[in-house]
Image (cartoon, grey):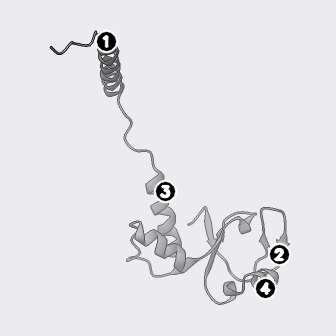
Amino acid sequence: MSTRYQLWDKASQVITPIGEVLTAGQWMERYPAAAAIPYVLAAGEVNGAFCTPLAQMKQICAQQGCDFSACGTDQEALDAIEAFEDAQNAPGEAVSNEELTATSLASIAASLEYQNMLTLDDAEVV
């Protein structure tokens, strides 16, 4: 079940981030395409914070690697999108302290070597 997104049922009111409370009719008057195609809104009370056609959202996510082959319904596609986003935003492997220390020491050594080279006198070419 999606926690960030919801399919708009074309009957519920829409509340925007600026506090507007719009009926379904007012929302469809403002966005006529919403009456004809499935739209995705933000989940929660302020559901007008996000609004996009489901097909466009699926296309963008498919280009990034989301697999919709097992999805039979729009809700399953929405769940797949959210799972895909969660996987992309999951933290990667943490860098170990040893690796971080080794990298830092190598960087410090290179900086000191460069600083020492700057203090050397230029060799004269005869």
Q: Which residue is mark 3?
A: 86
- Cα–Cα span, label 4 and label 3: 34 Å
- Cα–Cα span, label 1 and label 3: 48 Å
Q: Do callouts 2 and 1 mark residues in contact (Cβ within 8 Å)?
A: no
Q: Do callouts 4 and 3 mark residues in contact (Cβ within 8 Å)?
A: no
Which badge, 4 or 3, comes first in the chain's sequence?
4
For the N terminus, the image quarter is bottom right
Which badge, 2 or 3, comes first in the chain's sequence?
2
**Residue at point 41%, 75% (across, down):** 68
Q: Residue furthest left?
A: 126
User: Dot 3, crowdedness within 10 Å: few (<14), some or many (≥20)?
Assistant: few
Tag 1: amino acid? Asn
Callout in the foreground (1, 4): 1
Q: Which residue is mark 4?
A: 29
For the C terminus, the image quarter is top left
Q: Which residue is mark 2?
A: 22
Which badge, 1 or 3, comes first in the chain's sequence?
3
User: Dot 2, crowdedness within 10 Å: few (<14), some or many (≥20)?
Assistant: some
Label 1: which secondary element: helix
Tag 4: amino acid? Glu
Q: Do callouts 1 and 3 mark residues in contact (Cβ within 8 Å)?
A: no
